[in-house]
C-alpha cells in the first residue's frame, strides 16, 4: 500500500515529523527528516493496530511503500511577519494535500478517530486522584491536568484559525470541562465542513478543514502517549 507522506522539518525548533497525509493521526518523529521517514513504517503498523482495536481493520499496512510528496520547514515570525529566531509564533507545515476538501468518508473517519482518541485519553485517566493529576514531573512543562487543559486549548485554537471557535471568554477553566466543550463543538461542526474549499491565511499561516483535522487527531494521540509515559 502506498502512503503519501509530508515532511515537516524544524517542528518546535528541534525535530522532524513524517505525516501520513491521508491518515490523520498517523505520524512519526525523528531528529531529522531521514530519521522521521525511517520511523514511519513502524508508526503505520502501530496506527493500524490501534484502529484494529477499535473496529474491523480499514487500513492495509502490508507492503508499506512511502511516497514523500512534500517537505516543509517550519519557521518563526514576528508581528511584522518577518522571519526571526524561535518565538511563540511558529508557522507550521502547510501541504498541497491540505488544500483538498474533506469528502464524506474523510469526515466519517475523522469522527471515528476523534472518538477513539478521546476514549483512549479518558481511559488513561481512570483511577487517577486529583493529587496524581496535579503532580509535577521533572523537566516537564505541565502536570497531567496541565496537559489536558493544553489539549482543549489547542483544539479551540485550531477552530479559531478557521473562524469557527466560540468566544475565548467562554472557554472553561477546568481542564476536563474545556476538553468536553471544545470537542463537542468540533464534532458538531465537522460534518458541516464536508466539501468546503475554505482556506484561511492567518498570522502568516494557512489553515483548512483538512489541516485542522490532521492536527487535532495528531495532537491528542501525541499527548495520550505523553501521559502514558508519565504514568
Image (tube, rainbow, N blue to C red):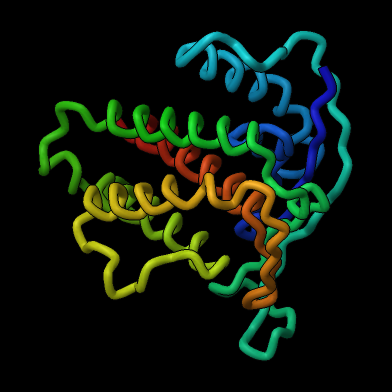
Q: Nearer the viewer, residue 129 or 56?
A: 56
> Which residue is rendered at x = 56% and y = 67% of the image?
161
Residue depicted at x 67% and y 45%:
102
Question: Above or below — where is 168 with respect to 42?
Answer: below
Residue placed at 49% from the left, 35% from the top? 111
Query: Can residue 141 be seen?
Result: no
- Given the current orientation, which residue lies at the most extreme bottom position? 80
Count of numbered marks = 0
Give the answer, above or below, for where 40 lies relative to 185: above
> On the rendered structure, is 65 left or right of 128?
right
Residue 18, x across and y down, in percent? 73, 39
Q: In the picture provided, is 182 more to the left or to the right than 78? A: left
Q: Is residue 172 visible?
A: yes
* Residue at the image point whose x is 53% and y is 45% from the top: 191
Left or right of residue 97: residue 12: left
Q: Quadrant of residue 83?
A: bottom right
Residue 73 occupies quadrant? bottom right
Q: Foreground: 60 or 192?
A: 192
Picture quarter containing residue 85? bottom right
What x and y, as percent, mark residue 194? 63, 47
Residue 224 location (% of width, % of height): 41, 35
- Image quarter in which the N terminus is found: top right
Image quarter (top left, top right, bottom left or bottom right) of the C terminus: top left
Report x, y in % for residue 52: 53, 12
Please tell me which residue lies in front, 54 or 227: 54
Amino acid at each position: 500500500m502506498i502512503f503519501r507522506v509530508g515532511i515537516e522539518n524544524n517542528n518546535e525548533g528541534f525535530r522532524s515529523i513524517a505525516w501520513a497525509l491521508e491518515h490523520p493521526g498517523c505520524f512519526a518523529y525523528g531528529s531529522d527528516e531521514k530519521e522521521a521517514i525511517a520511523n514511519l513504517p513502524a508508526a503505520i503498523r502501530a496506527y493500524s493496530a490501534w484502529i484494529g482495536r477499535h473496529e474491523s481493520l480499514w487500513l492495509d499496512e502490508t507492503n508499506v511503500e512511502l511516497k514523500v510528496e512534500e517537505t516543509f520547514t517550519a519557521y518563526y515570525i514576528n508581528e511584522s511577519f518577518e522571519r526571526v529566531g524561535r518565538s511563540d509564533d511558529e508557522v507550521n507545515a502547510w501541504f498541497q494535500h491540505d488544500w483538498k476538501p474533506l469528502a464524506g468518508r474523510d469526515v466519517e473517519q475523522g469522527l471515528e478517530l476523534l472518538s477513539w482518541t478521546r476514549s483512549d485519553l479518558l481511559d488513561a485517566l481512570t483511577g487517577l486522584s486529583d493529587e496524581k493529576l496535579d503532580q509535577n514531573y521533572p523537566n516537564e512543562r505541565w502536570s497531567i491536568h496541565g496537559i489536558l487543559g493544553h489539549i482543549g486549548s489547542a483544539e479551540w485554537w485550531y477552530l479559531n484559525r478557521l473562524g469557527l471557535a466560540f468566544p475565548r471568554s467562554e472557554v472553561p477553566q477546568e481542564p476536563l470541562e474545556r476538553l468536553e466543550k471544545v470537542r463537542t463543538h468540533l464534532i458538531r461542526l465537522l460534518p458541516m465542513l464536508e466539501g468546503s474549499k475554505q482556506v484561511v491565511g492567518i498570522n502568516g499561516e494557512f489553515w483548512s478543514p483538512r489541516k485542522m483535522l490532521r492536527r487535532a487527531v495528531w495532537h491528542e494521540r501525541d499527548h495520550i502517549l505523553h501521559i502514558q509515559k508519565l504514568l
